[in-house]
Image (tube, coloured by chain):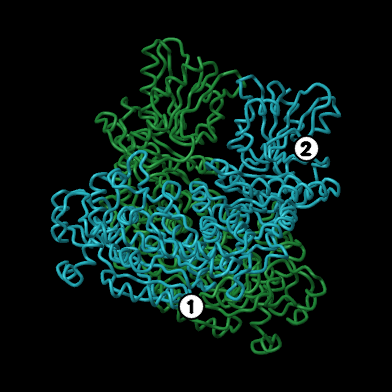
Chain colours: A green, B cyan
Amino acid sequence: MDIQELRTRNPEHWMRSTAIRALALDAVAKANSGHTGMPIGMADVATVLFSKHLKFDAKTPGWHDRDRFILSAGHGSMLIYSLLYLCGDEEVTLDQIKNFRQSGAKTAGHPENFLLKAVETTTGPLGQGISNSVGFAMAEEMLRGRFGKKLVDHHTYVIAGDGCLMEGVSQEAIAIAGRHELSKLIVFWDNNDITIDGKVSLSDKTDQVMRFKAAQWHVQEIDGHDPEAIDAAIEAAKKSNKPSMIACKTHIALGHAAQDTSKGHGALTNDEQNVAAKDAWGWTTGPFEVPADVKSWWEDVGTRGAADRTEWEGRLAEASESRQKEFERCMTGETPKKLSATIKALKKQLSETQPKVATRKASETALEVINPIMPETIGGSADLTGSNNTLTGDMGVFDTDNRKGRYVYWGIREHGMAAAMNGIGLHGGLRPYGGTFMAFTDYARPAMRLAALMKTPTIFVMTHDSIGLGEDGPTHQPVEHLAISRATPNTLVFRPADAVETAEAWEVALNQTATPSVLSLTRQNLPTVRTEHKTANLTEKGAYVLAEAEGKRQVILMATGSEVEIALAARDALQAEGIGTRVVSMPCIELFEQQDEAYRRKVLPAGPVRVAVEAAVQFGWDKWLFSERGKRDKGAFVGMPGFGASAPADELYEKFGITAEAVTAAAKGLL
Amino acid sequence: MDIQELRTRNPEHWMRSTAIRALALDAVAKANSGHTGMPIGMADVATVLFSKHLKFDAKTPGWHDRDRFILSAGHGSMLIYSLLYLCGDEEVTLDQIKNFRQSGAKTAGHPENFLLKAVETTTGPLGQGISNSVGFAMAEEMLRGRFGKKLVDHHTYVIAGDGCLMEGVSQEAIAIAGRHELSKLIVFWDNNDITIDGKVSLSDKTDQVMRFKAAQWHVQEIDGHDPEAIDAAIEAAKKSNKPSMIACKTHIALGHAAQDTSKGHGALTNDEQNVAAKDAWGWTTGPFEVPADVKSWWEDVGTRGAADRTEWEGRLAEASESRQKEFERCMTGETPKKLSATIKALKKQLSETQPKVATRKASETALEVINPIMPETIGGSADLTGSNNTLTGDMGVFDTDNRKGRYVYWGIREHGMAAAMNGIGLHGGLRPYGGTFMAFTDYARPAMRLAALMKTPTIFVMTHDSIGLGEDGPTHQPVEHLAISRATPNTLVFRPADAVETAEAWEVALNQTATPSVLSLTRQNLPTVRTEHKTANLTEKGAYVLAEAEGKRQVILMATGSEVEIALAARDALQAEGIGTRVVSMPCIELFEQQDEAYRRKVLPAGPVRVAVEAAVQFGWDKWLFSERGKRDKGAFVGMPGFGASAPADELYEKFGITAEAVTAAAKGLL
């Protein structure tokens, strides 16, 4: 690449884009850590996008109708930090740039949505940003469908690298976007031919242009250093009625000794080479210094969207008060006031009728009363709608001719679904939930973890949650997946025992604003164990006494979900022998852990022996088999020794010894 | 579809293929569970493949140079069971067919490689089979490269459905296959336009033909019910120098009332409809009955490959004795005898030189002595070669012009890498290991779980295993991933404390024949803590006393990996105050659990207080904070309270309080 030609072809653009390059170079060198090459390579695209197209107001990053900008190639975080600093974002001061990747800085190694308002989503794990962006673009369509173009009308722009495109989740994402003709989604592919291990061709010869066309995308190929070509491509992309991919041929670490090499991907810290690069760029100011005219131009870019925002605020003010309120309620993620009363009424009815139903079916029953009063819920399933029971009659199906539809047929794409749900939630205004079989937690894991890290309250509806699914066998029978989700920070794992606890779990999950939830639901029918109506949401405390011991309390049985029935039967047997036995239902261990010690000790007092029953591995349960105060309680666990097997469910419970008899024997063995 | 036309066009083929249809229909109906439509739809393809192309000997399913047949759409398991029964596989008797999906049957809900010799890989979780198959095809190329065409020369055939192709991992897999021109891999796409939720078009409009072409595949489109077209397509595919995809337009549940509907996907159990279907097919024998001429023809199909096998055995017998022995050793997965001495020598040297190195680097050091004596190892990384330290000088890079190369640049495809590694291992003859960052366990999870279920000893080299990676921040810092792998049945998780334990971990992992291993390795340097050479492999016992208490033993500190150094420093501090403190290194908790009680109690006797230190979440550790006998030991945990942060590693250890001071304070607090 002839830098001299770039410098002279459009000198003003060159200096403006090079401000990004220089800041990235300086920040990474100072941190002695990070990724320099990508911000240098994509500086031209970013400059044109931010200055001519992106609708944003640097001083008000949270404005609802802004365009969304997602740096899927999150390792290039200095690109976004440089842009925010240059544009005058109040959080990204020069001090923050100088403290890139240091303790306490908002300019973290990868862009974190919980540290900076202008960062829409946390990126770094490759493929996530582009998959989130599909959710962002869907949310825009859905909200436009509901609130109209005057309130919702924006684009979602993404920068993705080869890593994002190689990750399988990107295929799921682009197929969803293509299917739904998300025409306001525009992806820039940083086509620089380089990965960490070397040339892309070492590991890939995919024709990306053909691949995106196969997924029904509008595709263009441009020189990613030519501002006019970039501008024209964005214009054309905006006009397309399909999602758009712009393949930008770029040079990683442009103008640096590491240009076009895998060395250019990481931290460029060689002083001499960095000085030479700045020299080649014609950048003469000192470290972290941006010429006043360039900085001033960028600050104008940062305020360019203020008028758009003001106009939008005017339009919002013109809407009826109730519409404004509803829009704001949805955008803040507040549940409607009547949710509580609705759930209470359902619980009362369930305690009276005492249905014997699978909790996946009970979940549907809950959704049937929730969805009509929460028009912000977005349901869906990864091609298991009838099994996950996630669709209710009032939702309508999201499609190209029905943007108001609230149900998404995600296809066999658990990972893409989970990542897109995160995007829908992060966009704001909507509350996504989606279903698959619990064993396929594995497929959705990278996005489930990010929901927790990003503090977005996505709800994962995981049905067929144990050997209770029967004949499909061990590939489909989760045994370690409760442990996996429970081990994940900031995640609530609900395993309700009956229809009442299922309704309670939904209420708690919907009331979360910063924590995702996993609903672990059965395929098989369960009796109603909460036969006495309580207005209080007992699941909210995580665990509670479901059945008290009669006589001297000698045993405490702890159970979740489908095994609560077994614990109750074991209690009957023990009580028949005069052994006082308490049953504690533990639908959400994380919430129980959050209660004060007094409550925890009330539910699980020291003294009695303890038996826990769960059709899953023991891993993580030992904590509850001993009292917190180090008393010499004895504990036993009745559960799965390893993987399951293929057979009818009842036979499997017998085979693996998860029965009332086994629980009774375990308790007596400890006494 | 005009069944009558199919019946008359080629009546013999029709009856032969319909034997599969009828058996599937009967077995699923009897089980009242399973998937009928797919075996019915793909019966023609399977019949042509098995009778004219697939090199196999039904009586000797484990013959090394057989073609591999992989049913990626594993829910259609009755397809493979029918084929095996018809061909005379000795394990799949008629009784097994009648006991489909019942307790103890080998004919499980989904095909399980550990139940039937002829099942190459466990499928059901969609996308896995097609991704395994890439590994199978790679293994064939690699072994042909090493042992020559006389001993290794076979194809890998796959049946995949829309679900497999929608899963993102399939994109990773087909891109790898296209890149490496795996021309002996032939995939049949069951293009029936149906998924569980309805028409494929509900969720997908991908042009699959274009997509595979973009990935550099040879693609054909045929009528999947036309035996001549199927035959011709397979012939053409075999001739192609690229991997081949044959898009087979089929009708799910052909001839049944549920034909071409999503109802046809699942269990067809309506008697009347099933009778009508058999009538339409012209199938007049009773349930589970195959006309003698049809059965006899299939039995001939089953023995068709016996001659190939005999000839191959002859060729093997012609090879030199040492070559035969080496071939057999590799195929059985036996490690070479000199491995033990080699590791011992390395350990001795390390205990003497006491390097201060990251365990990822120590892993490279171990591989540098292992790879030269184990030509069956296949290394690789998901684009983090320099970070995972997985490449050694002697390996050579696997490429189109170097099939002998033993290192694979997998690209940014953790999931595809893991699934393909499983395929390489299941093929036999090779020992795959591959690296990524430990946090990206999440991406590889579905395949890691299947390695455990399938009992294949894949080795996952997971580096950057804690906040010790520093600035990349919480997206890249595993905190729950040790728990995730430890909660998974049949998985060994090694977290070595230094170069000596790393060498020991590699030895134990390589000696596994039925259990995968996860090596959790640091980015940051660690001192050698095993400064005294022991010939015994201490890691093999899972945990051991690294430093004994001086004076009265009051405290036991337990630690793994990078935190062993901290525990040793805490011990120094406690001993300085006269508090006798033992340090137990626990490089593999699963192995420790397998030791007898006497050993476990020797290492962790009741009495002293216990403090565990690990830069990860506490989940799963409570088990070790109390003694096994319910004694009133008190325990504390020093680790991560949740997600990490972006900052230099040393600062993070301070920030999160994982320090010798914190451990010392915790121990004293308990005394």
For disc 1, the marked residue is B241
What kind of residue is marked 1? Asn
Above or below for B109 versus A559: below
Q: In this view, does B255 lie above or below A597?
A: below
The residue at 42%/15% (across/down) is A549
> Can you tell which quarter of the image residue A626 is in?
top right
Q: Which amino acid does label 2 sit on?
A: Ala
Residue B410 visible within the image: yes
Q: How far is mark 1 from mark 2, CA to CA?
A: 60 Å
**Position of the N terminus of chain A by quadrant:** bottom right
Which chain contains the residue that carries disc 2? B
Residue A311 picture location, percent across and down = 45, 68
From the viewer's side, name the closer residue of B548 and A635: B548
Whether residue A58 is visible, yes or no, is no
| Residue pointed to by mark 2 | B660
Residue B152 location (% of width, % of height): 53, 66
Q: Do the residues labelled 1 and 2 touch (CB within 8 Å)?
A: no
For the residues tagged 1 and 2, is the chain the same?
A: yes
Picture coordinates of residue B319 (x, y %)? 59, 64
Q: Which of B339 and B229 is in front in this view?
A: B339
Q: In this picture, is A455 found above or below A575? A: below
Q: Where is residue B148 in the image (x, y as percent from the top left)?
A: 57, 69
Task: Of the two numbered discs 1 and 2 on the same chain, state the one appearing first in sequence.
Answer: 1
Badge 2 local density, few (<14 within 10 Å), some, or many (20+)? Answer: many
Of A398 and B454, nearer the camera is B454
Q: Classify mark 2: helix, strand or loop.
A: helix
